Structures are given as structure tokens and as C-alpha cells.
Amino acid sequence: MNDPWTDRWNDRYSKEEFAFGEQPNNYLKEQLEKLNVGTILFPAEGEGRNAVFAADLGWKVSAFDISIEGRKKAIRLAETRKVTIDYQVGELQTLHYNTEQFDVIALIYAHFPAEIKSLYHKTLDKYLRKGGLIIFEAFSKRHIDYVSKNEKVGGPKNIASLFSVDELRSDFANYEVIELAEKEIELSEGQFHNGKGSVIRFVGRKK
């Protein structure tokens, strides 16, 4: 991953306010509250709002991101909420997670660069136990029309970094699909996710 990409997120997360707020993503919250607690991994976790929420529910939480500034904010938020998260900084291939370590992997707006996003999905699959769940919400390829009209809704402006239902089916081909849908939703998450957007939502169980 190139330095400008890392610098961009360090700059965004170095501000005092939380870029996407301190509350968890609504879809993640809805899904986690249905489950028994266990081990969970949050890739591209940024400032920690979702990881801290899961820890508060009793999950054993791991997270990673390329941004050291994101980690600082996440650890601070965890301390405020009196919970503990294991948060590493680096690219996925430099981290040392174990095969079938996790019960759930939560990919919430984890927009990795286009050239590595499918590779990351397939690598992450190795760390999920059989019977474990992927919980996913991120912007769809149709979102390019939404962000062109309203930059405040956020998200990538290059279509290759956005997702389609077919991509998710391909990346997670060995999963029972519990939910896989493209939806228009209203976002209100901190400074950078505000307004109508188009997202893919996916919950899959590893076979």
C-alpha cells in the first residue's frame, strides 16, 4: 500500500473529532446484537467505533488499519468506554493472525485499494472458522452517482474501489448467503458519511 494512501488516513484521523462518529454502524449493531459473543476481527477499523462497540458487548476484539492515528483514537475510545481491544497497525500480509482464529469478521466500509480488495477478502477468509460469519457493509458501484451529487455522503470516487453483488459472490463463493443485497440508505455517521448512498450488505456463513 502506497504512502499517499496511508498519509491520507493519518491526516483524516489526526483531527480531534471522530471522522465517522463514535457510535457503531447501524447494520453492524443490528447483526451483532443477534449473536452470541465470541472472537471478532475488524479490518480497516479506523478510529475504532465498531470495535469498541463489540468489546462493550463482550466480544474478544481484534482490529487492524494502516493508520497509526486511527489506532490512537481507537485506543482512547476504548479506554473511555473501559474496554480492551487488540489493535494492530499494518498491511494484512504483515500481521500474524491464525487460521480459523475468528468467529466473525466485520468488514464495515473496508474499501481497500481496488488492486488488492479481492486478495484481502480471500486472505481474511482463512482466518474465519468454518461456520463463522462475514458481516459486510460498503458502498456499491452505483454509489458513484450519489457521491458525484453530494460529496458529504463520502466513499471512494473511483468505481473500481466500489463493490457489486457479483464481486461479493465471487470473493466469498464458499459461503451460505444469509443476506446479500444492494440498498439505498440514509447515512449519518460523523463528518464524512452524510446523506443518501448506495451500499452492498452481506452476511455469509462459511461452509
Image: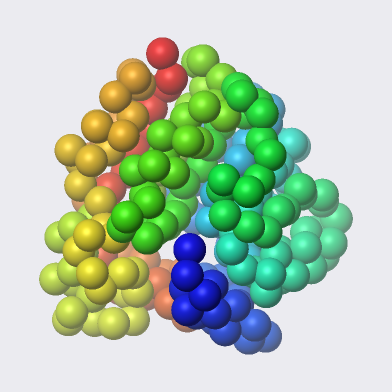
Q: Tell me, what colour scheme is on the image?
A: rainbow
Q: Is residue 48 above or below residue 106?
A: below
Which one is in front, 4 or 69? Answer: 4
Residue drawn 40% across and 72% down? 193
Q: Is residue 11 above or below residue 138?
A: below
Q: Quadrant of residue 82?
A: bottom right
Across and down, in percent, residue 17 comes to 63, 82
Across and down, in percent, residue 3 comes to 52, 75
Residue drawn 39% across and 42% down? 119
Residue drawn 57% across and 84% down? 11
- 63 sits to left or right of 85: left
Q: Quadrant of residue 101?
A: top right
Residue drawn 14% across and 71% down? 145
- Total marks drawn? 0
- 100 sits to left or right of 72: left
| Rendered-image quadrant of the C terminus | top left
Residue 139 visible: no
Q: Is residue 60 above or below residue 140?
A: above
Which one is in front, 36 or 177? Answer: 177
Across and down, in percent, residue 184 comes to 22, 57
Residue 18 visible: yes
Across and down, in percent, residue 160 comes to 22, 60
- 40 sits to left or right of 9: right
